[in-house]
Amino acid sequence: MSNPNRTQEAGKPSCCCTSSKGSPTERAYSDAVSRRSSAGLSGKAMWSIVLGVIVVFSAMLLCIPSHLRAVVAIIAIALIFDYVNGFHDSANSVATLVATGVVTPQFAVLWAAFFNFVAVGILGVGVAETIAKTLDPEVATKGVVFSALLAAIVWNLITWWTGIPSSSSHALVGGLVGAGWTAANCSFHVVQWEEVRKPIIGIVLAPTLSLVVGFLAMLVILWTCRKFHPVPLNWAFRKLQLVSSALYSIAHGGNDAQKTIGIIAALLVSEGYLRPAGEKLTGPDIWHQHAWVIFAAFLAIALGTMSGGWRIVKTMGTKIAKLRPVDGFAAATAAGAVISGLTLFRMPVSTTHSIAGSIMGVGAAKNVSAVHWAVSARILWAWVLTIPCSAVIAVGCYVLVKALGGA
């Protein structure tokens, strides 16, 4: 007679909740990183690609009329920011897939990148409008936009290096506010607070809603599936995780790529290359006059996702709460739903905040102690500090740019 305990063990997901150092989740993560290291892009390879693109692009600039070189160069930097954004946030899209061992890391990043790009046009460009209208058009000069981008990139890389999931969108908004404030002789009158209010609200709203939705989604799943045998249930949720990851990746691309579209649009309006049909810039203006900006931004974030931010995968996939396939499905679905809904309200939100919040909610639904609150508190501090820190960095960048004669 077979041992029922053994049957139950066999039915457990490959990455069950456990706090032991050599847990299946951590072993799965280690194996995933090993496979990723042998076949994927390392951090050095990623930077080699970025430097190669910069060198090639610098040579191409020589063929561009002198009055356009600065604008084209800043647009290229914006797309590099978009690429770094995808690289930085790829962990959000693939952490649950990798940590639960559903697919190989290589497949996970390709899957996420594909749906990042597919998102083009699905959720509109309302978020881009919000970013583009953060500053008065006359202030969004080349020097201000460049300083804001540089500050956001620096903050993204700092948090990537330390393994802390932070917000690229809030870093960009903070950079715009800091650089714009400096350019306006330390005056905030050039900042459109009605637009800035949206991402600030998102700091609280996105993770809170995601936590609540993730918590409720997990409770519903646990109650609905309480009588099912764990083996077929585990198999089903391993497949469903691909669907939830696709939904989350669409939401991620649909919100985050628009931030780059917005800052490029702000630059084009300031330089006279994009003319709003009415008093203020709208999405149709961008589509009708510069559709290439939209496609370029979505392509850049998809390429960045393919490169992967593997330091943050471990934090998102194992350190906040240990995940099983059912947990990963609930977390990705909850975060994707929240991000998509807020995107339709033209709110730039942090996809990182959202997925981290949903992972906390899923973990808390099983057991409050399943959530590593110390790690969550560390992440929370990074969220709170993102806008002011990136604003301070942008101030320094703009002062330096002005001193060099670029503002």
Image (spheres, rainbow, N blue to C red):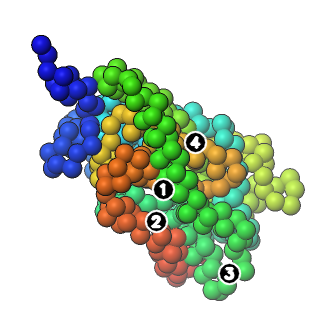
The numbered disc on residue 188 is 3
What numbered label is drawn on residue 383?
2
Q: Where residue 6 sits in the image (x, y, percent)?
A: 16, 24
Using the image as rendered, state which of residue 344 and residue 303 is in the foreground.
Answer: 344
Q: Are marks 4 and 3 in contact (CB under 8 Å)?
A: no
Q: Visible in this render: residue 258?
A: yes
Contact, mark 3 vs mark 1 (Cβ under 8 Å): no
**CA separation in Å, label 2 and label 1:** 8 Å
Q: Secondary structure at mark 3?
A: loop
Q: Secondary structure at mark 2?
A: helix
Q: Which residue is mark 1?
A: 353
**Tags 3 and 2 touching, CB below 8 Å:** no
Q: Is residue 194 left or right of residue 277?
A: left
Q: Secondary structure at mark 1?
A: helix
Q: Mark 2, residues whose alpha carbon is within 10 Å: few (<14), some, or many (≥20)? A: many
Number of the front mark, 3 or 2: 2
Q: Amino acid at mark 4?
A: Ala
Whole-percent x, y for residue 63 in the image = 56, 50
State the CA–CA distance, disc 4 to disc 3.
Answer: 34 Å
Q: How many marks?
A: 4
Which image quarter: residue 381?
Answer: bottom left
Image disc number at residue 337: 4
Q: Residue at x 53, y 47 (%)?
A: 213
Labels 1 & 4 near each other (Cβ < 8 A):
no
Q: Nearer the viewer, mark 4 or mark 2?
A: 4
Q: Earlier in the sequence, mark 4 or mark 2?
A: 4
Which residue corresponds to the image point at 73% horizontal and 68% vertical from the top-left? 194
